[in-house]
Image (spheres, rainbow, N blue to C red):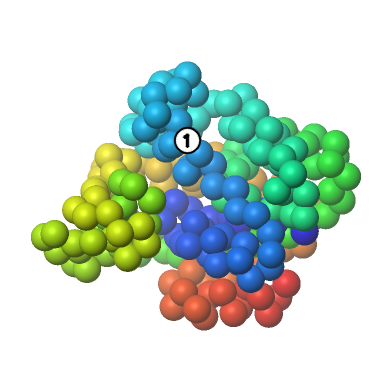
Amino acid sequence: MQVIIFGAPGVGKGTQAKILASKLGIAHISTGDILREAIKNGTVTGLKAKAIVESGGLVPDEIMGGIIKDALKEGKYQNGSILDGFPRTKAQALILDQIFAELSVNKPVLIKIDADDKIIIDRISNRLVCNSCGNILVKNDVSENFVCPVCNSKNSYIKRKDDAEEVIKRRLELYHEMTAPVFEHYKDKAKIIEVDGTEAIGTVTRNILRQI
């Protein structure tokens, strides 16, 4: 099963992708995590993407397409995958169409998670991310000498530069302008599942699984 998880930044795609990957027995591909790792390690891809990501822009299609194509060809993805963060543009959707055709994927599942922009801005601007493992928490839950419940790192929670309110607003503008139209591209190419992302995490998961 090939799944695309779709929605605005901060709507909960990454959280649901990890849960669904575990429950469905497929691999989770987070382009955001891959890019952040490349930026952290100072790789060629990371250096190219660093300034773009931190300003709230979109990484060029050729970079993203190459990352996805290489990943999907790895053995651990042969039973299926859930794509988190790709495609974000119509051009990327066309690239993914070609990749799926090469892999004989006839009709992927597209999960669209919806939430109002105001809720998303509040959610992202009040979150912190573990610099070691990428776990996300609300900043009110992170105190001095806090130990990450996932990787046990101490004082590792930071506010990402691309989570600043002005950057979030720019990311949402880009989403509505460039990414939202991708949904139309898949209306006759994928099995469409739409859910309300403002509900509790467990409720969102159950609503998705019920429709799958």
Quadrant in the rendering for residue 2: bottom right
Tell me what residue is drawn at x 46 percent, y 74 percent. 201
Closer-to-camera residue (19/121) = 19
Query: Quarter holding the N terminus?
Result: bottom right
Residue 67 falls left or right of residue 46: right
Q: Please, is residue 93 above or below residue 129 in the view?
A: above
Residue 181 falls left or right of residue 148: right
x then y, percent, for residue 204: 53, 75
The residue pinned by badge 1 equals: 35
Query: Quarter holding the C terminus?
Result: bottom right
Tell me what residue is drawn at x 37 percent, y 62 percent. 150
View extreme (left): residue = 144
Number of labels in the image equals 1
- Is any atom of residue 84 visible in this view? yes
- Element carrying mark 1: helix
Q: Please, is residue 122 above or below residue 30 in the view?
A: below
- Is any atom of residue 121 visible in this view? no
x then y, percent, for residue 175: 49, 45
Q: Residues within 10 Å of mark 1 (few under 14, many from 20)?
A: many
Closer-to-camera residue (43/60) = 43
Tell me what residue is drawn at x 73 percent, y 59 percent. 109
Disc 1 residue type (three-letter): Leu
x then y, percent, for residue 49: 44, 26
Q: Please, is residue 48 above or below residue 77 in the view?
A: above
Tell me what residue is drawn at x 68 percent, y 79 percent. 210
x then y, percent, for residue 130: 31, 52
Residue 90 falls left or right of residue 162: right
Q: Please, is residue 106 above or below residue 71 in the view?
A: below
View extreme (front): residue = 152
Residue 186 falls left or right of residue 195: right
Closer-to-camera residue (54/184) = 54
